[in-house]
């Protein structure tokens, strides 16, 4: 610091600076004036004293136009000031440090804010502001800002600098807190000589609670410890008792705020402190904003020499914003009660440090077979597959959802997972099976439908949830279509004993009275015979499908590339349904359609599903018999010992401690005994050639939901007398099989 040298004049006077009554309410006056007059005891010329007074007056006027009296707090931020200084509960941009540090976590991106203004139209009285906010996570953010108030002319210069370090944290989902630590630096220069220098520290705290998107409340304790500064007396002679004194430059100021959003782009705000602050903001297409505000001072002021107080006039403000990409240009107009108006300008640059963190390598969405639509809610590579690669150096938590508009009520979350850093060729890559959760609208589709599936990938980075959306074509295959790979398990979805039509038919057939003689002890056998002949009476016949016969689709094609170890292990680990959604497709007949229409012809899988449905509805357990290019069924007899049945061993199948009878579906139109013999021969041949597979219908139902069309149908009455006649004609042939 330069030594203060006395000023030589012809007339030397000790000057006592007196502030005119009309402006005594202004902040900033007390501390610096007393600093000049009280601590330094300078003897100056009258001209010099007046220069000091002018500096102090102007600088202090500019520092607290819209805030309460007696506080050396410098309001900053063009947007908050344009809203009447009602920003404590809003606090969602780069001005949050100065208005409520609890709002730092709402910024959601890196942001730089710069502001400058000549207060009240005075060129020599300048205010500058610069802030920088960095989100650390979605619940933590830091910031730093710098504020300067400066007055300067040819004789005198005064400055007030404040640097603030800020931290905000999300305590709960709706509650956040923040703290500011600020360093205050003040100084004055007269005719090139430093006449004052002071430093100190202050603290702010803030809280913000936002229970909904449209409502928030906030609290801001500014300068909670009454910010004070220590003057530097090293080169100035003062009394020893004065050296340890501190001067208060900012008093504690408590503010409460509330924000209400009646519409998505509309904000109404209120702050209450030593004044009442009201503000409003309206965004237009997220590009242009207009705002306005009002400040009503609650306390009265008492000018010097007056015994009564008067209420300070209210202040008005207005402003707007123009946004272009990551740039935001703000303007505010402030109408001061006694001084000139102030125009403030600022520019905010918000940016995401967001390089390409996730790469979508591929998306495969396979045709959906609506016959099995209730199975698709389980993530499954046979539904589709998304391949993601992390391009980031740290772990990334991701979530993947799938949505098909109209046919899904909401997006289905298929996974929450972590993408590892990409350290090698495959380290950062993950395969994610897709899934769908359809509503019942798909049941009403009368033909195949080409639509789009939306794949949504979310991840969190730098305080914000990032989202990737991609659309992929998907074919919805109407109910009734099916294709098989290596297993017949999907067929059980068509075996629905709960179908009212099937239940009625099976009950009526099984209750037909017949003369059974010695066969009466074999209840399941007689029930199976009754249902078989009931179908014969309806005219049910086997015929290979000319367009897509069962033989042409079974075991043809593959839905996934099984050369990859990932796919193979996944298919092995999960009990997935093996459906070849790449076709070729077969029009599978629902049992009820063959019971209620005159279309009575079906191929082997159609008739197997029909007969199995009726047997299960009558309480007879069934299994499908897969012999490669043909399928039929067998039913449980409830007999455990071959000797109890007294038939040839080759005519029955021993499985699970019970005897089962195979039925050749192709034999419809002939007798029950002929179908039994044909089934036994086909079973024996397949077993000797090691081509035999059995599908337990009940076990497969754990994977495949039983379904039937939602259409209302009229049942065709069963000709019971015709059925009884057919049973009687075949009884002798059947009995002969037992006598052998």
Image (spheres, helix red, strand yellow):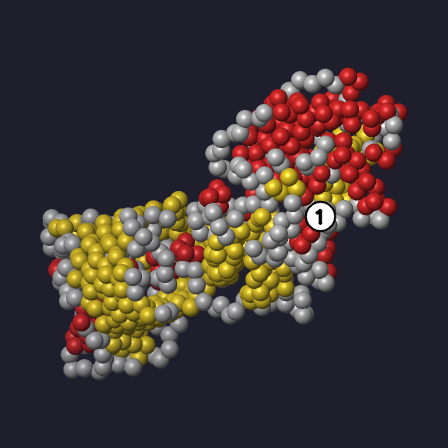
The residue wearing badge 1 is 487
Q: Position of residue 309 (x, y in %)?
A: 13, 49
Comparing 461 with 689, the one in front is: 689
Q: Is residue 719 left or right of residue 263?
A: right
Q: Is residue 471 left or right of residue 645?
A: left
Q: Residue at x 77, y 44 (%)?
A: 693
Q: Residue at x 37, y 69 (%)?
A: 326
Q: Residue at x 11, y 52 (%)?
A: 306
Task: Say which quarter of the image contains residue 621.
Answer: top right
Q: Residue at x 64, y 39 (%)?
A: 541
Q: Is residue 490 left or right of residue 41?
A: right
Categorize mark 1 by other alpha carbons within 10 Å: few (<14), some (14-19), many (20+). some
Q: Position of residue 674 (x, y in %)?
A: 76, 34
Secondary structure beneath dot 1 equals: loop
Q: Quadrant of the N terminus?
A: bottom left
In the image, residue 528 above or below residue 6: above
In the image, residue 478 above or below residue 12: above
Q: Inspect this view and state whether residue 483 appears.
A: no
Comparing 477 with 176, the one in front is: 477
Q: Is residue 470 left or right of residue 40?
A: right
Q: Inspect this view and state whether residue 420 appears.
A: yes
Q: Position of residue 540 (x, y in %)?
A: 62, 36
């Amino acid at each position: 610091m330069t030594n203060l040298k006395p000023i030589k004049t012809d007339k030397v006077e000790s000057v006592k600076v007196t502030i005119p009554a009309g402006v005594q309410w202004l902040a900033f006056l007390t501390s610096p004036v007393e600093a000049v007059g009280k601590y330094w005891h300078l003897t100056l010329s009258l001209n010099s004293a007046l220069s000091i007074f002018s500096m102090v007056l102007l600088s202090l006027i500019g520092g607290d136009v819209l805030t309460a009296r007696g506080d050396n707090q410098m309001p900053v931020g063009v947007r908050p000031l344009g809203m009447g200084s009602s920003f404590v509960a809003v606090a969602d941009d780069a001005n949050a440090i100065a208005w409520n540090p609890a709002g730092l976590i709402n910024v959601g991106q890196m942001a730089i804010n710069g502001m400058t203004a000549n207060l009240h139209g005075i060129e020599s009285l300048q205010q500058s502001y610069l802030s920088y906010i960095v989100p650390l996570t979605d619940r933590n953010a830091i910031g730093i800002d710098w504020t300067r108030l400066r007055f300067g002319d040819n004789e005198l210069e005064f400055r007030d600098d404040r640097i603030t370090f800020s931290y905000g944290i999300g305590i709960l989902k709706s509650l956040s807190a923040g703290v500011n630590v600020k360093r205050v630096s003040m100084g004055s220069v007269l005719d090139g000589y430093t006449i004052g220098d002071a430093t100190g520290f202050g603290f702010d705290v803030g809280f913000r609670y936002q229970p909904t998107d449209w409502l928030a409340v906030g609290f801001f304790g500014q300068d909670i410890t009454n910010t004070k500064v220590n003057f530097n007396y090293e080169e100035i002679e003062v009394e020893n008792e004065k050296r340890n004194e501190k001067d208060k430059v900012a008093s504690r100021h408590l503010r409460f705020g509330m924000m209400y959003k009646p519409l998505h782009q509309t904000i109404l705000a209120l702050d209450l402190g030593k004044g009442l602050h009201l503000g409003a903001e309206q965004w237009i297409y997220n590009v242009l904003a207009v705002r306005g505000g009002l400040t009503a001072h609650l306390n009265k002021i008492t000018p010097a020499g007056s015994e009564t107080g008067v209420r300070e006039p209210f202040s008005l403000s207005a402003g707007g914003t123009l946004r272009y990409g990551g740039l935001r240009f703000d303007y505010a107009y402030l109408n001061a009660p006694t001084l000139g108006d102030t125009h403030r300008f600022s520019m905010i640059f918000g940016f995401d440090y967001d390089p390409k963190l996730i790469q979508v390598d591929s998306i495969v969405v396979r045709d959906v077979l609506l016959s099995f639509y209730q199975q698709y809610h389980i993530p499954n590579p046979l539904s589709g597959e998304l391949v993601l690669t992390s391009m980031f150096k740290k772990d990334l938590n991701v979530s993947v959802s799938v949505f098909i508009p109209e046919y899904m009520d909401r997006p289905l979350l298929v996974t929450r997972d972590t993408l590892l850093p990409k350290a090698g060729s495959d380290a950062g890559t993950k395969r994610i099976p897709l899934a769908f959760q359809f509503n019942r609208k798909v049941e009403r589709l009368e033909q195949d439908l080409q639509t789009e599936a939306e794949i949504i990938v979310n991840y969190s980075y730098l305080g914000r949830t990032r989202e990737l959306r991609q659309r992929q074509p998907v074919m919805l295959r109407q109910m009734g279509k099916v294709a098989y790979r290596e297993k017949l398990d999907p067929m059980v979805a068509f075996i629905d004993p709960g179908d009212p039509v099937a239940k009625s038919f099976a009950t009526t057939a099984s209750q037909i009275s017949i003369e059974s003689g010695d066969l009466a002890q074999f209840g399941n056998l007689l029930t199976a015979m009754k249902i078989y002949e009931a179908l014969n009476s309806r005219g049910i016949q086997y015929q290979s499908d000319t367009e897509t016969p069962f033989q042409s689709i079974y075991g043809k094609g593959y839905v996934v590339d099984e050369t990859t170890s990932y796919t193979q292990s996944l298919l092995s680990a999960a009990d997935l349904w093996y459906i070849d959604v790449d076709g070729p497709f077969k029009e599978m007949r629902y049992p009820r359609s063959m019971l209620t229409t005159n279309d009575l012809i079906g191929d082997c899988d159609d008739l197997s599903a029909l007969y199995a449905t009726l047997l299960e509805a009558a309480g007879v357990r069934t299994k499908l018999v897969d012999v490669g290019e043909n399928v039929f069924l067998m039913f449980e007899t409830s007999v455990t010992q071959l000797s109890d049945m007294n038939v040839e061993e080759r005519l029955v199948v021993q499985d699970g401690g019970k005897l089962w009878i195979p039925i050749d579906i192709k034999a419809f139109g002939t007798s029950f005994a002929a179908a039994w013999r044909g089934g036994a021969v086909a079973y024996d041949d397949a077993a000797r050639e090691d081509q035999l597979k059995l599908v337990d219908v009940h076990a497969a139902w754990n994977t495949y939901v039983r379904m039937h069309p939602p259409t209302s149908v009229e049942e065709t009455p069963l000709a019971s007398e015709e059925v009884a006649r057919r049973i009687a004609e075949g009884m002798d042939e059947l009995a002969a099989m037992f006598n052998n």
